[in-house]
Image: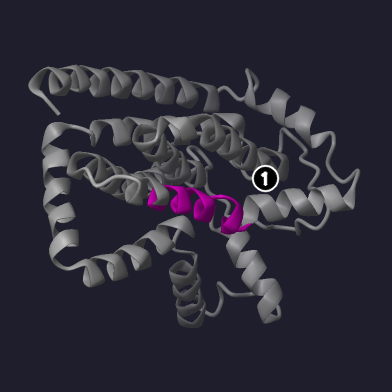
C-alpha cells in the first residue's frame, strides 16, 4: 500500500470510527427511552409469538445455535484469509477478528455497568408473551444493552466486508436476519442490537490504525515460519470466538454451581440443562 493510499485509508478509518461511535451513543439514548422505538417494535413482533409452534422452534434454533451465526461467519473469515497472500490484508483480518472478540468483552462489561433496561422477557411494562418452547426463564437477568452476541458477530461481518467487499450484502443481510430474531425471543430490544453493532464497528475501525496493522503483520509472519502451530492455535481460538466460548462458560457455570449450591436451585437433566445454559449466556 503506497503512502497516498495509507493516508487516505487513515482518514477513512477515523471517520468511520467516529460515525459508529455516534450511532452507539444514539442507541444508548434509545435504550433509556424505550417507548420511542424499543417497546413499540417489540410489541409488534411479540404479537406473532406462539401462533405457530414450528415457526417458534425454528426462530429459537436459529437464534440459539452458533452454527447459524458465528460458525458461518468464521468460515467466511477463513475464506477471506486463504483468498489472499498479502500480509497487509491478512493483518487486517487477524486484528479485526481479535478485536471483535475484545469488543464482545467490552459489551458484556457495559451490560453490567450501564443503567439501561432489562430484557423484553423481564420488562414489566411490556408484558412479554414468550414464543412456544422458550421456557420460563431462559435468559440472564441483567441489563441487555448492548448485545454481546451482535457485538462479536457484527465485528466479524465488518472484517469480512473489509477483506472481501463482494460478500458484504450476504453477510450483512444474513447476520441482521439471524440476530433480529433475538428481539422476537425477548432476549434483546432493537437498540441493543444497534448498540452492539455500532460498538463492534467502532472498535474494529479503530483497530485498522497503522500501528495495530503493523503488529498484526508480525503475527502473520509467524504463520509463515511455524504454520502448524499457528493454525492449531488459530483453529482453537476462532472456534471459541464463533461459539462465544460457550463450552468454557458452561464449565465455569458448573463449577460455580458446585461451589455455591444455593445458586443452583433448579436441577434438570443434562440435555435440557445444556439448552437452558446456552440460552442464558446472552
Q: Tell me which secondary structure the magenta stretch mostly adopts.
A: helix
- Residue at 41% from the left image edge and 23% from the top image edge: 25
Instruction: List x then y, in percent, for residue 127.
Output: 78, 38
Query: How many dots with numbers?
Result: 1
Is 16 above or below relative to 222?
Answer: above
Say if the magenta span includes residue 166.
no
- SS for dot 1: helix
Instruction: List x then y, in percent, for residue 183.
Output: 66, 38
Q: Nearer the viewer, residue 266 or 62?
A: 62
Q: Is residue 280 visible?
A: yes
Q: Is residue 267 visible?
A: no
Instruction: List x then y, in percent, for residue 163.
Output: 35, 37
State which quadrant residue 269 falls in: bottom right
Instruction: List x then y, in percent, for residue 76.
Output: 46, 48
Say if the magenta span includes residue 67.
yes
State which quadrant residue 139 falls in: bottom right
Dot 1 corresponds to which residue? 122
Q: Quadrant of the N terminus?
A: top left
Q: Is residue 194 left or right of residue 209?
A: right
Number of other residues with Cα within 10 Å of mark 1, as a class: few under 14, some 14 to 19, many 20 or more: some
Is 262 above or below relative to 231?
Answer: below
| Region of the chain picked out in magenta, as a range | 65-78
Q: Nearer the viewer, residue 224 or 183?
A: 224
Amino acid at each position: 500500500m503506497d503512502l497516498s493510499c495509507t493516508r487516505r485509508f487513515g482518514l477513512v478509518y477515523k471517520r468511520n470510527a467516529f460515525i459508529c461511535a455516534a450511532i452507539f451513543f444514539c442507541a444508548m439514548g434509545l435504550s433509556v427511552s424505550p417507548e420511542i422505538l424499543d417497546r413499540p417494535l417489540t410489541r409488534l413482533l411479540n404479537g406473532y409469538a406462539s401462533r405457530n409452534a414450528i415457526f417458534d422452534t425454528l426462530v429459537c434454533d436459529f437464534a440459539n445455535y452458533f452454527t447459524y451465526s458465528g460458525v458461518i461467519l468464521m468460515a467466511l473469515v477463513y475464506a477471506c484469509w486463504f483468498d489472499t497472500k498479502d500480509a497487509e490484508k491478512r493483518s487486517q483480518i487477524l486484528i479485526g477478528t481479535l478485536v471483535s472478540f475484545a469488543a464482545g468483552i467490552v459489551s458484556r462489561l457495559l451490560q453490567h455497568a450501564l443503567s439501561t433496561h432489562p430484557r423484553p422477557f423481564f420488562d414489566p411494562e411490556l408484558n412479554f408473551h414468550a414464543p412456544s418452547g422458550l421456557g420460563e426463564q431462559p435468559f440472564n437477568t441483567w441489563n441487555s444493552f448492548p448485545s454481546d452476541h451482535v457485538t462479536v458477530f457484527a465485528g466479524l461481518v465488518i472484517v469480512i466486508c473489509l477483506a472481501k467487499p463482494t460478500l458484504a450484502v450476504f453477510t450483512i443481510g444474513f447476520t441482521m436476519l439471524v440476530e433480529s430474531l433475538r428481539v422476537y425471543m425477548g432476549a434483546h430490544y432493537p437498540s441493543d442490537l444497534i448498540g452492539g453493532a455500532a460498538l463492534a464497528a467502532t472498535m474494529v475501525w479503530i483497530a485498522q490504525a497503522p500501528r495495530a496493522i503493523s503488529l498484526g503483520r508480525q503475527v502473520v509472519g509467524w504463520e509463515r515460519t511455524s504454520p502448524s502451530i499457528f493454525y492449531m492455535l488459530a483453529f482453537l481460538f476462532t472456534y471459541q470466538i464463533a461459539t462465544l466460548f460457550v463450552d468454557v462458560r458452561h464449565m465455569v457455570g458448573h463449577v460455580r454451581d458446585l461451589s455455591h449450591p444455593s445458586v443452583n436451585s433448579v436441577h434438570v437433566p443434562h440435555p435440557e440443562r445444556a439448552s437452558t445454559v446456552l440460552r442464558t449466556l446472552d
